[in-house]
Image: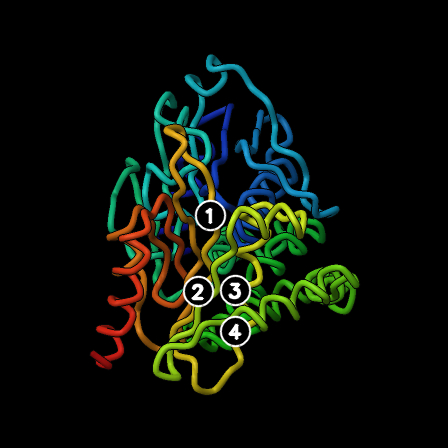
Amino acid sequence: MSEFAKIFKEYIEEYDIITIYRHVHPDMDAYGSQFGLKTWLLDNYPNKQVYALGYETSDVEFIPQSDVVEDDIIKNSLAIAVDCGNLDRIDDQRITLAKKILKIDHHPNVEEYGVDNLVDTTCASCTQLLATIFKEIDSNSVLKTCSEYLYRGLLTDSLCFKTSSTSFKTLEIGSYLASKDIDIRKINLELFDVDLKTFKLQTIVRNKINIIDDHIAYVIFDLHELNEYQLDGKKAREFVNEMGNIKEFEIWAIFNERIDANNNIIYDGSIRSKYVPINVIASKYNGGGHANASGVKGLSKSDLKNILIDFKQALNII
């Protein structure tokens, strides 16, 4: 058993109440890690109280709603943060009330905010790391529903096993999860099939692409467009992958307008790259993530201009 698995097991067995947290604007790896971990805990420690927390909601059918708990529950819990490199990006800041915080992540360890930080940047997803830990504790401990959550996160964060962080270990864990009688075809349909409305929106996104020097692509959705297309910012940013399979594009992003508390227009964004690490750039703009997939939030108009300049500098085309 690895050191990570030993540390994880010791913390789990010490606490009767466990609260689990994800990052803001959660993607499938965040959801898969959070609900995969919750399911695994309830499968193997049925007498423990386990809660998955977070305020943002999803309309995806197979993603459960978050639990609702009082502060006193959190104060008596072990808090586990998954798939989140920075404490201030956690979608429920009550995590700081917990007795202890355990961080489990695959992003660069830019902030050590837990009593222990189980971080492995060689993993293609946080769900890969969790599945590895579960398997090392007991290969029979991962059941079908848990495997489905973990596999979804693994498949999406590795971009269907295409990212540079995909390794033979990633494929081994994928095979291990697939061996738990999950329906791979059904999962792929759930994740990647789109309805007619989404198909039409994909066409709109492609028609809106701005291209810089053939290697940088970006789209901006303004408030009027979000209203016209009945999109919230999170949904708009999910279309970022529409630019991901163009040979020339090395960095691409989607930004959306929103109104802040002072009634100013600001921008949130999702950024992707093929080779260049963009998490360092994202960290300058209230964001973060991993090398080829990051997010930013609260950008001013001048920030938006500057981040595009940073993209050019990263590719040495200035």
- Discs 2/1, front: 1
Q: CA distance from mark 4 to mark 2?
A: 8 Å
Q: How much space separates mark 3 and mark 1, taking CA atoms?
A: 15 Å
> In the figure, is residue 218 to the left or right of 99?
right
Outermost residue, top side: 72
Q: Which residue is mark 3?
A: 240
Q: Which residue is mark 2?
A: 253
Residue 129 seen by the camera: no
Q: Crowding near pointer 1: few (<14 within 10 Å), some, many (20+)?
A: many
Q: How far separated are the C-alphas under marks 3 and 2?
A: 6 Å
Query: Pointer 4: residues within 10 angstroms few (<14), some, or many (20+)?
Result: many
Q: CA distance from mark 3 to mark 4?
A: 6 Å
Residue at the disc numbered 4: 243
Label 3 or label 1, whichever comes before in sequence order: 3
Q: Are marks 3 and 4 in contact (CB under 8 Å)?
A: yes
Camera-side residue: 276 or 201? Answer: 201
Query: Are discs 3 and 2 less than 8 Å apart at CB?
Result: yes
Q: Residue at x 63, y 52 (%)?
A: 149
Disc 2 to disc 1, C-alpha distance: 13 Å
Which residue is painted at 58% across and 39% down in the image? 38
Q: Is residue 185 visible?
A: yes
Q: Circles 4 and 2: CB distance less than 8 Å?
A: no
Identify which amino acid the numbered label 4 is placed on. Met
Residues packed near mark 3 inside 10 Å, few (<14), some (14 to 19) or many (20 plus)? many
The answer for how far apart the CA atoms under marks 4 and 1 are is 19 Å
Q: Residue furthest front?
A: 224
Badge 4 element: helix
Q: Amino acid at mark 3?
A: Val
Image quadrant for the N terminus? bottom left
